[in-house]
Amino acid sequence: MGELPSIQQLENFITYGRIRNFTIAAKEANITQSAFSFQMQKLETVLGVKLIARSNRGSKLTPEGEMFFLRLNSIMTSLTEAVYDVRNFNANNLLDLKIGVLTSLGDVLMNQHVAYFRRNNSNIYISVYTMEEEDLLQALKNGSIDIGSTFLPSDIKVNGYEKDCFCIDNVVYYAPNVKNLTGEISIARLMDVPLVRYPPKYFMNAMIDQYFAQINELPPIAANLSTPYAMINYCQQNQVGALLAERLLTALGVESGYYVINPLLNLKAYLLYKKKNPKYKMMKVFIDYVINLNKKSNPGRDCL
């Protein structure tokens, strides 16, 4: 048998096959475009087959490249799964699991899950990243994270991903310094108080705009703040209000100063992931844990 391709060459070929663009693929592989192109040429030399057709108009996989890409995808997934399975036999080997959390969901909730989970799965190391919807979906796509925790608007397509709803979040009106608020707060009453919002392009703003579209009017904007924690603090210092997930307020120990809104605003929270991820067995243990925990701790607010 002649020379075999290196694992790095094969992994980078899979990256190209998924993206079909040398510049973007090289950036994702974290090497220069010339180094990436050289690796692909070396792979073709080792195999004795032209995998990528190059021209002044760009590049594309040849028929042989398409066939090799499909076969290699399956083989590399199985190889990586085997590596993780072997590591599982050794409790001293830490297995990494990367989780992205939508900013407005609040990472404090996921941190609580992680702390509990780690006590019972000491060989799994979990990193939590807070990000916005577009970045979260891109990170899932390129493998920077293994699981995404997010709300999902109806116009966002998540083809190619598994999605498990783990909770329905009640959005409430938090306004601890606003006087004469009692019981249920109508959408009309919300117009009388300045509102703290997220920056313009954040996902939650679209949900809030959609909510107020019922009356074709928005409250005056007090501030645009990037995290729910900053919004909570701002509301505690000023006579303003904010629309926040009740579950997050409860997790932070906030027991008063927020009110049910009418009409209700409920959002489904999902865990997104790829079933073909080589870490799938480990991911599924964590996913099932989060779903079951929310069923127990938030009866009536699960997705059934």
Image: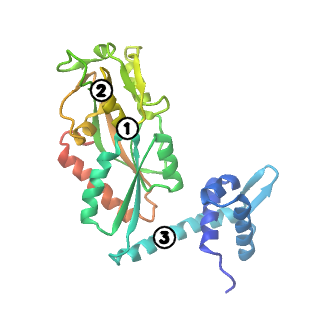
Label 1 amino acid? Answer: Ser
289 and 245: which one is in front?
Answer: 245
Q: Disc 1 vs disc 3: which is toward the camera?
A: 1
Q: On the rendered image, what quadrant is the C terminus found in?
A: top left
Instruction: Give neighbour class at mark 3: few <14, some 14-19, many 20+ (Cα, 10 Å).
Output: some
Label 3 amino acid? Answer: Thr
> Which residue is found at the position 63% from the left and 75% from the top?
6
Q: Report x, y in % for residue 93.
A: 38, 74
Q: CA distance from mark 1 to mark 3?
A: 33 Å
> Which residue is found at the position 67% from the left and 87% from the top?
1
> Which residue is found at the position 40% from the left and 27% from the top?
197
The dot on residue 80 is 3
Q: Disc 3 vs disc 2: which is toward the camera?
A: 2
Q: Is residue 226 above or below residue 137?
A: above
Q: Is residue 138 above or below residue 278?
A: above
Q: Report x, y in % for residue 57.
A: 79, 49
Q: Which residue is mark 1?
A: 104
Label 2 amino acid? Answer: Gln
Secondary structure of the residue carrying numbered label 2: helix
Q: Disc 2 vs disc 1: which is toward the camera?
A: 2
Secondary structure of the residue carrying numbered label 1: helix
Q: CA distance from mark 3 to mark 2?
A: 51 Å
Q: Earlier in the sequence, mark 1 or mark 3?
A: 3
Instruction: Identify the image quadrant of residue 126.
Output: bottom left
